[in-house]
Image (tube, rainbow, N blue to C red):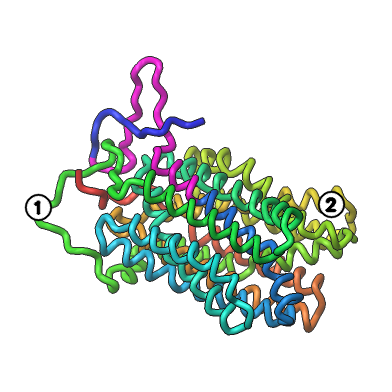
Amino acid sequence: MYLADCRSTGSRGTEAAAVPDTRPGRRPAAVPSTVLALGAVSLITDVSSEMVTAVLPLYVVAGLGLTPLGFGLLDGINNGVGALVRLVGGHLADRGGRGHKVVAGLGYGLSALCKPLLLLAHTLPVLSAVLAVDRTGKGLRTAPRDAMISLATEPAHRGRAFGVHRAMDTTGALLGPLVAFAVLRATVDGYDAVFAVSGCVAALGVLVLVLFVPRRIDAPAAVRRPPPPEPVHPPQLREAIGLLRRPELRRLTVCAALLGLTTVSDSFLYLLLQRAGNLPAHLFPLLPLGTAACFLLLAVPLGALADRVSRRRLFLAGHGVLLLGYGLVLSPWHGVPAVIAVLVLHGTFYAATDGVLAAATAAVVPARQQGAGQALVGTGQALARFACSLAFGAAWSLWGGRTALAVTAAALAVSAVVAVFVLRGTDETPTTDEVPA
């Protein structure tokens, strides 16, 4: 358990000067209550989302008659929409000054509204519209949520804070399919019952956000700066895009996108793993749970490790772990032990990169533009992974799955070497443009 409040004695001019509370019997609070509340919201929302995700492919293909290729294109387009909307969400949250909770709440609310609407989606156009709105909600809330985590946490503890949040989020991803399975077994309405329960759970997540996440996110006292002499206008859109003029953020964004271009989507990797390990088809749904379980166990310790060493180095090391996983899939070692080893490596990759990248981004972006900064890096990575999915699917059709993975693994190795040189010698000292006291 972590202390819910975040206090510190002393005050200096930059983030790096955080001073822990050293009174006898007290430990510095690494994870503020705001982060825990946001983690609870993400946990509940992910239970709702993964309930739908677990049954949607079968519902669409078997119930509505859409081909698997059609579903793949539908899902890919919606993911691309969500990635682009993330930029809008980050910018709107920053323009509102203290509007991160409002924009995040709008995103969570849109996604919650979409769950019961699935009960009415019996044709492809209606289903596409509902899923597009759901992805829009996810895109709106992601950057403001990560900005609130960054603003509420001492810089020295951001890796751990993001790790705690991602661990709670992944707990929801683990529980969602299990809840959907239980609902399907206990009801006669099947998919409709899952969609209805999912909507109720999503509404609970919005309620937790409204009641327990503060609207005003104050930076820890140790990292506040004196107020500026003149009022600061809300960030403009050109300023948000102009963040890429910052060398540290530009390098981080380029590396995240470059590595994203060589990161195979989870669905393709699980399919390759199932075929390589000759797993029965009924065990296929368990593969994502294996990755999520490992992610859950390692998110917090690896986040804390990133705070002590280098977040960027750990981010690069995570992709090295992923490359090792690709190698195991391509190796002659098959069977259940090999499958477990790949899932462990896959979960470790996510634990070493997801929250760690957000923490690294927070350190090089001004507090008043945290939303836009998180959105720029996240969108670049998401669009790159979307492009990789399309390219990998085409390569699979032309050359076969193993050859496509071998080519992607080689490209990942080259990209990782390039990323090492791009990030080498970069400064991880946090920006001094902090929140006024």
Residue occupying the far front of the picture: 188
**Which sits earlier in the primary sequence, circle 1 or circle 2?**
1
What amino acid does circle 2 point to?
A: Ala
**Which of the numbered marks, if any, corresponds to residue 229?**
1
Residue shown at the point (61%, 46%) measured from the top left: 171
Residue density around tag 2, few if under 14, some if 14–19, many if 20 or more, within 10 Å: some
Residue 122, quarter of the rendered image: bottom right
Is the residue 216 above or below the residue 50 in the image? above
Residue shown at the point (59%, 53%) measured from the top left: 47
Spot occupied by residue 139 in the image (x, y as percentages of width and height): 46, 66
Spot occupied by residue 37 in the image (x, y as percentages of width and height): 43, 43
Residue density around tag 1, few if under 14, some if 14–19, many if 20 or more, within 10 Å: few
Is the residue 26 above or below the residue 11 in the image? above
- Give the SS element for disc 1: loop
Residue occupying the far top of the picture: 24
Distance (Cα) linking label 1 and label 2: 61 Å
**Front one among 152 and 159:** 152
Residue shown at the point (68%, 78%) measured from the top left: 71
Residue shown at the point (27%, 55%) measured from the top left: 98
Q: Find the magenta span and give its range.
A: 13-41
Q: Is residue 124 left or right of residue 107?
A: right
Determine if residue 312 is in view. no
Spot occupied by residue 97 in the image (x, y as percentages of width and height): 25, 58
Spot occupied by residue 352 in the image (x, y as percentages of width and height): 58, 49
Residue identifier under label 2: 338
- Give the SS element for disc 2: helix
Q: Is residue 340 left or right of residue 255?
A: right
What amino acid does circle 1 point to?
A: Pro
Q: Quadrant of the C terminus?
A: top left
As for residue 339 lying within the magenta part, the answer is no
